[in-house]
Structure formats: structure tokens, C-alpha cells
Amino acid sequence: MKIDNHTGWDTRALKTIATRAVRGEFRPDDVRRATLHVVYSRTAQVSGWAYIGSSGATVRVPRPQRARWDKTPGLRKFPGALFAGVVVHEFLHALRALDHKDMGGGRDTAMRGCSDAYDWAEKVEVKVRQPSARPKVTPIQKAELALLHARVKAKEWKSKEAAAGTRRKNWERRCRRAEARVRDLTGTLPLHELLVPENAVADQEAE
Ligand SMILES: [Zn+2]
């Protein structure tokens, strides 16, 4: 069974309960290709819906802040037994194409989650996932970060500038050497102004 969990309740624990709840009720092949969508209910109730004869069911569970308190102080209790019952009920609609009449009549009897059969599910611990740990950035931190970034970039380009300057000077030196060689061989300096940077010419003339 695939769990498509849109809530903060722990997916593995939900899967543990759902898998155990449907065991024996459905063909293993049907269970394998089934998808259980878990979403938040707008109330503190557990409810669900499914298309008759489909492979997916949706079960709505309360938000942690709406769930009742656990025995452990500060913790909310996931309604495991109700969840298990609704999971089975919705998959009876989906995987076995049963309607409420097929399930024995009235809506109450169809809601198997109301029975004691799923008490075991109360013992499965369903934790609430911690919200993503990305800290909120304050305007001051944002401004400081922008400053740091600008400084790093300025330093980076300053060192590139220095390296470029060094290489420019090397090439200018090569210009002067090449110039001298041409002049030695020909007695003239063709295209001199075009090829040689002005300061190099000045240096050459000063030598
Ligand atoms: Zn139903």
C-alpha cells in the first residue's frame, strides 16, 4: 500500500496501522496497488471517502492541535482505532466495490471503526513530524548577509584584477622584447603604434 500523506502525522506509523487494519480483508495484490491518501479533516473527526471500485481511498484525520491530549504531557494522541476503521471502510468501497448496504445496512454499522476491533491501533505511537528546521531569517540577518556577500564578491574581483594586471604587464614586457628584436633585424618598427600599448612605447622610448 502506498501512503500519500499530506499531514504532519508520521507516515511510517500511519502505514503500520493501515497495513495491519486491511490485513485479511482484501486480496494482497489489491492492497499492494492501493493508495491511501491521508489529509487533514476540518474537524476533530476521522472521516473518509473513496470511489467504488477504485484503488485509492482518502482518509481525513484531525490536525495535531485538534487531536485530544495524550497521557504524556504536551503530546497529542492520534486517533488510531478510528483511523484503522475508516481505512478498512473506505477500502471496502474502493477495492471490493461495496456500498453501505453490502456492508450490512445503516451508516453506523458500516462504520467499522466504531467497534473495539481496532483497539490495538491505539497502541501504535504516531508522532507529529517536526516542521522543517529552516530558521526564519530576520531583516537584520538578511541585510548582514547581503553585506557579507558583497564584500566576498568585491574581494574576489580585486584578486582577479590583480592577476589580470600582472598578466597585462607580462604581455607588455613581451611586446617590448619583440619590438626590439624586430628593430634589430629590420632597423624599423612596422605597425608600432597599432601593436604596442602607449605606456610600453613610452617605456621603450625612455630606455
Ligand atoms: Zn462509506
Image: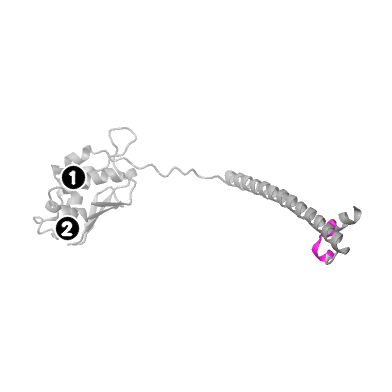
Q: Is residue 173 found left or right of 121 in the rendered image?
A: right
Q: Which residue is mark 1?
A: 20
Residue 40 can be seen, yes or no: no
Crowding near the residue tagged with mark 1, few <14, some 14–19, many ≥20 C-alpha atoms within 10 Å: some
Classify mark 2 as within 8 Å of ligand 1 or not, answering yes or no.
no
- For the stretch drawn in magenta, what is the main secondary structure? helix
Q: Is residue 54 left or right of residue 65?
A: left
Q: Amino acid at mark 1?
A: Arg
In the rendered image, residue 14, in percent from the top left (x then y), is placed at 26, 45
Decide: is 77 above or below 182.
Answer: above
Q: Which mark is residue 95?
A: 2
* Residue 132 is one of the magenta-drawn residues: no
**Which image quadrant shows ligand 1?**
bottom left
Residue in the foreground of this view, choosing between 22 and 31: 31
Q: Which residues are magenta?
A: 192-200
Q: Residue at x 21, y 47 (%)?
A: 18
For the image, the number of numbered tags is 2
Residue at point 84%, 64% (across, down): 192
What is the x, y in percent for residue 127? Answer: 31, 40
Q: Is mark 1 within 8 Å of ligand 1?
A: no
Depth check, front residue: 176 or 1: 176
Residue 99, x across and y down, in percent: 13, 60
Residue furthest toward the right? 206
Mark 1 residue element: helix
Q: Amino acid at mark 2?
A: Leu
